[in-house]
Amino acid sequence: TGCRFTSGSINFNGKDLTKLSDKKKQQLWGTKLSYVAQSAAAAFNPAHRLINQTIESSLSHKLNIKETLQKEAVQLYKEMQLPNPDEIGERYPHQVSGGQLQRTMTAMAMSSKPDLIIFDEPTTALDVTTQVNVLATIRSIVKEHQTAAIYITHDLAVVAQMADRIQVLRYGNTVEVAKTSQMLKSPKEVIPFLFCLYPTTSIQGAMCEIYLVTLLFVSLPFEVKKVFLIK
């Protein structure tokens, strides 16, 4: 899907994702691994109601019956601080604001109770005030559900707000690893490149090469060894 693995491995829960068959990977996508896109407006189908899109992946993987998944979705809407959580799911994407749509997409990613969520610059298209609120809500729900998260961003303000630890990467190589407060106060080397953020966990040498990215890991044993993704 626009990239290929040239070397290395991505070990997730004891499995190397680069060696899995498409069928095996599809069993993980939408169940153990979820994704929140940069543009919520482009990620949603304009012809379907929000509630149906929120539970679609969980329903297709038969994680529960439709009625139960819908109740859980409403609860997630409440946790994401969406207005009128009991009714907002009946709206279509164009009937809610950008910030509300981004929160709904996070609820959709959380619906299957995944082990890991990848956030791909989810607040880039939002204004500053909305961005702050959405980031706070994302961090809160991730911690509450004890879900790991990879947060991709270039924004140092986001880095300061979201990260527990920072790993600085340059050209796919680790330059420095430190707590967020220490890194932002006195970095060993000032480099306008990649930041890989995560709290204490068993990660070694996370390396990637997709322009400029930031990774946030939260409470999940996860290891990436020199994986180069080429667009």
Image: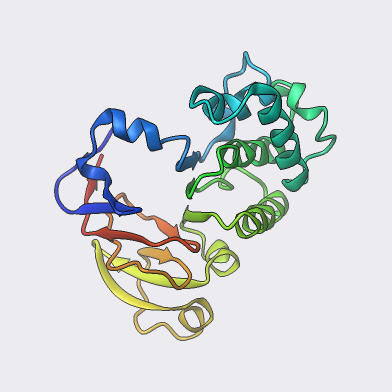
**Could you tell me if residue 105 is visible in this image?**
yes
Tell which residue pokes out farthest to the top in this image.
Answer: 47
Frontmost residue, 194 versus 144:
144
Position of 218 compared to 77: left or right? left
Give the image location of residue 177, x and y in percent. Answer: 37, 77
Q: Is residue 38 above or below residue 183?
A: above
Frontmost residue, 46 versus 149:
149
Position of 218 compared to 131: left or right? left
Frontmost residue, 40 versus 109:
109
Total numbered badges shown on the rendered structure: 0
Query: Residue at the location (69% across, 34% down)?
Result: 73
Query: Residue at the location (39% across, 62% down)?
Result: 221
Q: For the N terminus, give its image quadrant.
A: top left
Quarter occupied by residue 112: top right
Q: For the C terminus, give its image quadrant.
A: top left
Give the image location of residue 135, x and y in percent. Answer: 64, 55
